[in-house]
Image (cartoon, grey):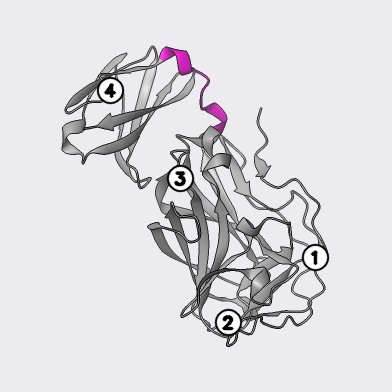
Amino acid sequence: MKKNLLSLMMVCCLSVMGVQAQNNVEGINVKTAPDFVSMVAANRATTDGVWLTYAPEELTEITAVGIGMGFSWGSMFPASMLTEFAGATITSFAFVDSGDPAYEGDYEVRIYLGGETQGETMVCQEPFHVSGTQGNIVEYPLNTPIGIDGTQNLWVMFYQDGSLEYPAPAMGDMGDPNNRWIAVDGYGWMDLATVGGEGYSWLVWAYADGYDMIGENADEVAIYPNPTTGNVTVSATGMNHISVFNGLGQMVYDAPASSHLETLDMSQYQAGVYVVRVATENGVSVRRVTVM
């Protein structure tokens, strides 16, 4: 059984001291809040999936970062780390609620696919509210799941409009610049360590649902013809559900299957590569289908 909390960087968490950090880019004043919270309890889903995160399983002291204006922050999970997650869906994310009313406010989660130095295509932009009363890591469901195809970088970012002094939960630097992305209006996308945030990295969790079952029936599923300009046949013993995702991770088809042979009309979709997720009584298999 795969672990429910997957740390993409297996290194120890550092304690954060809450000191003022000065900026390296003129006009940006990165600062950290002292005594944000000393311990965080987990409150996250634990079935049929895995958490994508750079954070360790056990957190000690964490802090919060602000710059006095609206900004985005978050993590990029490279495609090289997501190959085994192809066919899973991002169904929720987790965010630190410190339990302090001073941190109550409105945020946005923004998810992008593709891009090396910034998110290329935004596939999700949803508001959420932090109550400032929880005192733990809170899970928020996405209104629309995002499919992982295993070939594109995945960016999980947060935005706050600057109405809060210290909106961005952070921990000691885990050593990977992909967990230190920050975007400030007028400055573009940067490494937090280059703009006055040395020693810190972000706390980001994204839940990949269905991961634990992927590949368990890989030899039982066939999809043909592939490539196609029209219909494809999906063949699998004990098949009970089919989902199709486009190149933006958007679900374009989702329906139960009633037999071991199902026909999908792919002519209704634009040309490109699609991920077909087939669930059977023995597990889940993932196939890529090219529409010409």
Q: Residue at x 48, y 53 (%)?
A: 141
Residue 36 magenta? no
Of the residues under marks 4 and 2, which one precedes in the sequence?
Answer: 2
Quadrant of the rendering where the C terminus is positioned: top left
Q: Position of residue 212 (x, y in %)?
A: 57, 30
In this figure, which residue is indicated by the disc labeled 2?
164
Vertical arrangement, residue 183 with respect to residue 290, above or below: below
Task: Look at the numbered disc 1 and give the secondary structure of its residue.
Answer: loop
For the residues labelled 3 and 2, the Cα–Cα distance comes to 33 Å
From which residue to which does the magenta span run?
211-220
Is the residue marked by circle 1 packed among few (<14), some (14-19), or many (20+) residues within 10 Å?
A: some
Residue type at numbered disc 4: Asn
Q: Quadrant of the N terminus?
A: top right
Q: Which residue is mark 1?
A: 61
Indicate the quadrant where residue 8 lies: top right
Query: What x and y, as percent, mark residue 186?
Result: 46, 80
Task: In the rendered view, tell whether residue 273 sits above or below residue 241.
Answer: below
What amino acid is found at the position of numbered circle 2 in the picture?
Leu
Q: Residues within 10 Å of mark 4 (few under 14, many from 20)?
A: some
According to the image, label 3 marks what residue? 152
Characterize the magenta stretch by its predominant secondary structure: helix
Q: Earlier in the sequence, mark 1 or mark 4?
A: 1
User: Residue 226's mark?
Assistant: 4
Separation of marks 1 and 4 at Cα, in angstroms: 52 Å
